[in-house]
């Protein structure tokens, strides 16, 4: 991860009219005083870029300053030291020595690795010098200098320790980020992982799908805020921030704007006054940053497969040390992994959208039946918690006033299942046109589908309505039994001989006949209507059979009642894990005097 660093990487707070950084520089070069002619900024820059590790502990034994070389040599992060008492850091073992330097002003040296020296993760073999810092005749702190590098073996061991810590963080992130294929959930997981472990405030913004992005140019598109997370106690101060669901636009020149335009992480540390205003993305964010006391910002682009998809912005207050370059690299790796999870979620959502549109296009209203039969149908996708399935239904108008009703469910989910569903429907229309009885239609369909090795198996239920002869003829290929709903009687699940699913090539289908009465309704459905996780299918079917459904009135009202009773709705409802398709058919009364009609056999 590349990053840009703004407003300096090290912070030094002035002590009176003379900066501590300047006094520290003077002490380290041997003067012990405060030179009046040198520029404090120049001396601060010299310390920041010096190849020798240097740090400053104030008179209360709190870490006040450290340069980049010091963090590299000791293996400690700025967040591990700055603002904290020596006793609460890896240098706790050296607290006594530092206190003696404050008391008598005498230089002391230590070699790390002994009990009274800094402990892990500081590598053994480092030679440290402690020198009193005297300002205007008074000891105001201790300068800590790293004089020697550790042995090569110790340096390698130290590097391995840092690598393990980095991998541990990324492993923890892999477990907590991207647990679902939902974009909003993944963004919320990313923000929750960052706070409070990595930042005091985190926001995640996502670009609209298929937004054209040109590298190196300002991004003028509004982003969608998907997650906000903040440390405990900051709720009131971040009220001005845009929340999830709102659109945001990051001002050009801000830390977030520069990160989006360049595709690199932007670090802004030591923010005060005008610097904070320049780094804030918008007035609302600036007000929240000021109320919260933000002093350090890190904007990290979310890039997956070479494409910018969003932005992670982290902030720390004055109560926490600023972000370091090493932390920026680590957080960049974390953002890269999170971006891949987000991109996977987006691809999944796009695939689901295509499958759903395809399925809805194929599941148009059933073909027009004869006038002697009323029909109603519904299709409900399972929603974002699951995937689009291969549920389908069809009606085929046959001679002599007969209508073939079909309900099927292709095994599997997604675009492939929807495509196979289309294959089953078109094949069934062709076979049904041969005017075969239902069990022979299934046998022929099974033979045709089994010859296609790429086709998925499917369950199927056929019901041939013959109002002229007052008969239902039914046959099943592994499908759930239909329900018969009649006035004044409980819902009945019809017993039908069941053969293997279509596409297996096993055949063996049978059929059964049932008297068709005017006023009775046949309900066909897919398993998504009744099946529940960890529940026996007999229990699920018994729940359907126990329903008191309206046997009279419009068929649409009947389907509403069925779906209201069985389809999951609300946070406490059992979760459906498949799509739902239902088809209801009811014979109409035959005109008086009309003779029965049927095929000549």
Image (tube, helix red, strand yellow):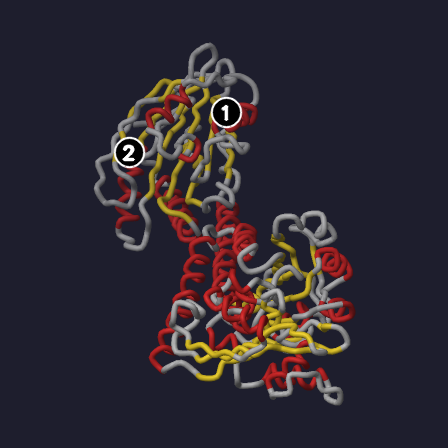
Q: CA distance from mark 2 to mark 1?
A: 32 Å
Q: Is residue 75 left or right of residue 285?
A: left
Q: Residues within 10 Å of mark 2 (few under 14, many from 20)?
A: many
In the foreground, 442 or 49 = 49
Q: Check the image and report above or below for 84 versus 453.
A: below
Mark 2: which secondary structure?
helix
Q: Earlier in the sequence, mark 2 or mark 1?
A: 2
Of the two numbered discs 2 and 1 in the rendering, the one whose residue sits closer to the viewer: 1
Whether tag 2 and tag 1 are in contact, CB under 8 A, the answer is no
Q: Is residue 306 left or right of residue 40?
A: left
Residue placed under numbered mark 2 in the picture: 439
In the foreground, 404 or 150 = 150
Q: Position of residue 467 (x, y in %)?
A: 43, 22
Is there any visible trace of residue 79 in the rendered image? Answer: yes
Q: Position of residue 285 (x, y in %)?
A: 73, 59
Residue drawn at the location 28% of the way across and 28% of the way down: 511
Q: Residues within 10 Å of mark 1 (few under 14, many from 20)?
A: some
Q: What number is the disc on residue 565?
A: 1
Q: Is residue 343 left or right of residue 25?
A: left
Q: Check the image and report above or below for 134 versus 461.
A: below
Mark 1: which secondary structure?
helix
Q: Position of residue 249 (x, y in %)?
A: 71, 62
Q: Check the image and report above or below for 351 versus 513.
A: below
Q: Position of residue 415 (x, y in %)?
A: 44, 53
Q: Residue 532: which quarter of the image?
A: top left
Is there any visible trace of residue 311 in the rendered image? Answer: no
Which residue occupies the extreme front position in the image?
A: 104
Residue drawn at the location 55% of the way across and 52% of the way down: 192
Residue drawn at the location 70% of the way across and 68% of the way down: 271
């Amino acid at each position: 991860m590349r990053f840009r660093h703004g407003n300096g990487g090290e912070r030094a707070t002035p002590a009176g009219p003379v900066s501590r950084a300047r006094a520290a520089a003077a002490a380290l070069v041997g003067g012990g005083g405060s030179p009046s002619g040198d520029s404090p900024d120049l001396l601060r820059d010299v310390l920041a870029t010096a190849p020798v590790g240097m740090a400053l502990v104030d008179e209360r034994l709190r870490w006040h300053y450290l340069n980049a070389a010091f963090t590299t040599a000791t293996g400690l992060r700025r967040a591990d030291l700055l603002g904290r008492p020596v006793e609460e850091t890896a240098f706790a073992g050296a607290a006594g020595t530092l206190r003696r330097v404050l008391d008598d002003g005498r230089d002391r040296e230590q070699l790390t690795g002994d009990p009274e020296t800094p402990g892990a993760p500081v590598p053994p073999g480092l030679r440290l010098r402690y020198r009193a810092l005297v300002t205007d005749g008074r000891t105001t702190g201790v300068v800590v200098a790293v004089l020697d590098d550790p042995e090569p073996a110790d340096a390698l061991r130290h590097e391995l320790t840092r690598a393990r810590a980095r991998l541990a963080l990324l492993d923890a992130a892999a477990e907590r980020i991207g647990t679902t294929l939902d974009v909003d959930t993944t963004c919320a997981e990313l923000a929750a992982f960052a706070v409070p472990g990595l930042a005091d405030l985190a926001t995640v913004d996502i670009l609209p799908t298929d937004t054209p992005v040109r590298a190196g140019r300002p991004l003028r598109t509004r982003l969608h805020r998907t997650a906000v997370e903040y440390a405990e106690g900051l709720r009131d101060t971040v009220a001005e921030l845009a929340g999830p669901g709102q659109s945001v636009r990051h001002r050009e020149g801000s830390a977030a704007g520069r990160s989006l335009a360049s595709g690199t992480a932007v670090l802004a540390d030591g923010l005060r006054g005008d610097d904070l205003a320049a780094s804030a993305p918008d007035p609302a964010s600036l007000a929240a940053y000021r109320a919260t006391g933000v002093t350090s910002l890190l904007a990290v682009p979310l890039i997956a497969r070479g494409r910018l998809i969003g932005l992670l912005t982290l902030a720390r207050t004055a109560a926490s040390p600023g972000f370091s370059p090493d932390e920026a690299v680590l957080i960049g790796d974390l953002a890269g992994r999170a971006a891949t999870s987000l991109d996977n979620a987006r691809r999944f959502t796009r695939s689901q959208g295509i499958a759903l549109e395809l399925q809805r296009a194929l599941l148009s209203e059933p073909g027009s039946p004869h006038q002697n039969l009323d029909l109603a149908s519904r299709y409900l996708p399972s929603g974002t918690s699951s995937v689009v399935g291969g549920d389908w239904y069809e009606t085929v108008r046959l001679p002599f006033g007969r209508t073939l009703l079909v309900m099927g469910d292709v095994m599997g989910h997604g675009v492939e299942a929807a495509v196979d569903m289309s294959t089953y429907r078109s094949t069934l229309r062709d076979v049904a046109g041969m005017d075969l009885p239902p069990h022979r239609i299934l046998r022929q369909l099974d033979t045709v589908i089994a010859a296609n090795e790429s086709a998925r198996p499917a369950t199927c239920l056929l019901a041939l309505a013959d109002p002229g002869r007052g008969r239902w003829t039914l046959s099943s290929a592994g499908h759930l039994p239909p329900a018969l709903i009649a006035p004044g009687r409980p819902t009945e699940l019809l017993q039908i001989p069941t053969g293997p699913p279509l596409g297996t090539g096993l055949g063996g289908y049978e059929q059964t006949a049932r008297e068709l009465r005017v006023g009775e309704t046949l309900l066909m459905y897919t398993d998504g209507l009744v099946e529940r996780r960890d529940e026996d299918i007999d229990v699920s079917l018994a729940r359907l059979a126990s329903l008191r459904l309206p046997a009279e009135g419009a068929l649409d009202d009947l389907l509403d009642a069925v779906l209201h009773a069985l389809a999951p709705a609300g946070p406490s409802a059992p979760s459906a894990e498949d799509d739902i398709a239902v088809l209801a058919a009811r014979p109409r009364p035959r005109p008086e005097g009309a003779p029965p009609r049927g095929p000549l056999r």
